[in-house]
Structure formats: C-alpha cells, structure tokens
Amino acid sequence: MKITKELAECVGLWLAEGDNKTEREITFTNNCLELILFFHANMDQLYCGKNKPRLYVYSSTPRILITNLNGLIIRNYSDSRARKTYYIYRLANVQFVKEWKLTVNEVKLSPDYYPEVLRGLFAGEGNVKHDLKNNNSRHLRIASGVRNEFIEKLLCFFDIPLKFDSKKRVYWIHGRSLEKLNSIDIASLHPEKEAKFRRMINSVKEKHYSPHEFRTLILKELNSFKTTKQLAKFFKKSEIYTLEVLSTLKKERTISNVKTKNGSFWAKKHIIEHHHEVEEFEILHNLNKHGSLSRTESVIGMARKVIASRLLRYQKEGLVSYIPSKRSWKLTEKGKIIVGVDESGSEF
C-alpha cells in the first residue's frame, strides 16, 4: 500500500475507532458521516477485492436514514440507546486485513506521518473542553481506557507533557501545548471539533510576560530557526513587540537572523554561524566543481542574486576572486583550503 498523508490520517482514525483484534474485516465506527466517507474513499483506492464494503447506520428511531451512498451496501438499524446517529463501516477480506495491519505498523514507525496520525486519533477519540465563561479553562482531551504507549509516543514527539487522568480515562492537553497542536491542524478532520477548536484558539487574548521572562522564553525557542510571525503566534504577542525584543537581542549579539527566499529566520548566534559555514562550503564547493554560477545556482537551489551577494562577501574575505574577462569567479588559495582542494585542483 502506498502511504500518503490521507492514508496516515486513516491509520489514526482506525487506531482510535477501529477493531484491531479481528483478522477478518476492517471496521471503523464513528458518529460523523464525513469521517466515515473519508475513510471509505481511502479504502476504496486501496482495495481491489470482490467483497463490497458495508455501512451500518444506527439511530434511536427505526426509520430508514440512508439507502444509497458512494457504492456502499447500506443497512439501517434502530438502537434505543443512541443519543446520536452513529455508523459502522465494515470491509471483510482476510488478505486485505493482513496488508492493512502491515501498513499500520509501518506508519506507526514513521515520525514523518505523526502529525497525520495524531489528527486521525484526535478526530476519533479527542474532544475540545472550553468554558466560554472562563477563558482560562481551555483543554483538549484524548480518550483512552488505560495509558497508551503509542499515544504517549506521539505526544512526546510533539513535546507535549503527559497528563493522564485514570479516573476520567483521558489525556489532558492545555497551555502552550495547544499552539503546538494548532500548528499541525489537530482538529481539521472533524467539522464539529474543528469549529470548537477554532473558537477556543481565537478566544485567546494577548498574553502578558515580564520583559525578562519574554526574552528568556524567546531564547529557549531559538535553538532552531523561527520567523517573527511564528514566535508572535506561539507566545500570543504582537509581531511588532516580538520584533522589538528580537532586535534588542540581536544588538546584544545573542541572536542573529538569516534571510532566505522563504523569509527571514531568527536563531541563536552560534546556529546562524554554523548555517553560514555550511552555506559557504556548499557555494565554494560547487563553484570549484562546476565553475559556472548558473550551474551552482541549480545544484544548491539558491537564487542567483543571493549567491552573487555571498560571493561579494567572500571576495572581501579573500576566498574568491572575480575574473572580468571571463565574467566568472574562482577560488583563491584561502578558499581552496576551506573546500579542501589540492595542487591539482581536485578536492580531497
């Protein structure tokens, strides 16, 4: 099975609401018809067997709700206990179940798909807890009968503190962790949960920090590249105030920034310096290897204007020299030492 982001989301849905014990069929239960159809659409792209998938519709009244839907065999039933109509999707095929479970295990071992898996899990077993009268009461919950090793692995991957309530049988998520989950669109699969989550996130007012506290918190986040907008959104501060603090830290030589075609990024000074060293080696190495500025541009994926500006800086540092007659650049002896070029012109 070819793994896609949509398929990884279905893995999350199935882990939350599927029957992982049966060997004969794939089942998925939910009261959101949009999720059922999303799951069916992805199964339909993978499954080539003869057995048609079935959809069992349960409601509190014995009336027929659905008779035909996207090629599914429909069965309508009454369930007096059902406060809301719910659906059970079933696809019976022993061989396909084996292939599906292998794919599930593969996805569970692939961190690249963890945002999608967690989205699926939340759509199935998550809910939004927001007290409109008390804006400080803002939580997400993921239901689990007992502590779940894989759920905890996902939460740790996103650096979210583990808070499991054994009495209510849920994982609680709140505070700054909500912004981390907002960044991966945690509730986007489920329309109702998405609406509640958006309302909760949009209700947040600008948070107040002391100047020293805000500086300290920003520095902790700058162990990796961040934009002003990302930092402002994460700390719930205005971009103008965030930029003022960043500019002050830059003047103090604590942090620096680098401009790319994707925007301006901030990080601690030693991280920026390392970035420049790697960038310098890449440009000099490819310039020595290909000799052509256009070829260097295509290989390292950097805009010609940016490379040209870097070369002017390297020229001042004595690493390259410009040959007007050929309209080209070449490495100086100092530049060759950085790249590791011997007397024959080969790199070692």
Image: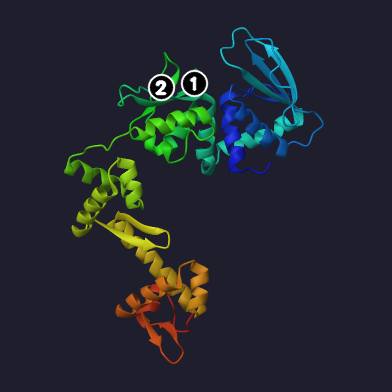
Residue 348 appears in the figure: no
Residue of label 2: 164
Q: Residue furthest bottom?
A: 325
Q: Earlier in the sequence, mark 2 or mark 1?
A: 1
Residue 125 percent location from the top left of the image:
51, 24
Residue 31 image-quadrant placement:
top right
Q: Nearer the viewer, residue 195 or 321?
A: 195
Instruction: Specify few, some or many for label 1: CA neighbours under 10 Å numbering under 14, 14-19, or 20 or more.
Output: some
Q: Residue furthest top?
A: 80
Residue 100 image-quadrant placement:
top right
Q: Secondary structure at mark 1?
A: loop
Residue 152 percent location from the top left of the image:
45, 29
Q: Is residue 273 left or right of residue 30?
A: left
Q: Is residue 113 above or below residue 258?
A: above
| Residue shown at 63% from the left, 28% from the top | 36
Residue 30 appears in the figure: yes
Residue 304 percent location from the top left of the image:
45, 73
Residue 68 percent location from the top left of the image:
74, 26
Q: Which mark is residue 197?
A: none
Q: Is residue 37 above or below residue 246?
A: above
Tell me the kind of residue under disc 2. Answer: Phe
Residue of label 1: 144
Mark 2 and mark 1: Cα distance apart in space: 9 Å
Q: Is residue 242 above or below residue 156?
A: below
- Are the two marked residues, 2 and 1, in contact with CB atoms closer than 8 angstroms? yes
Tell me the kind of residue under disc 1. Answer: Ser
| Residue shown at 48% from the left, 78% from the top | 293
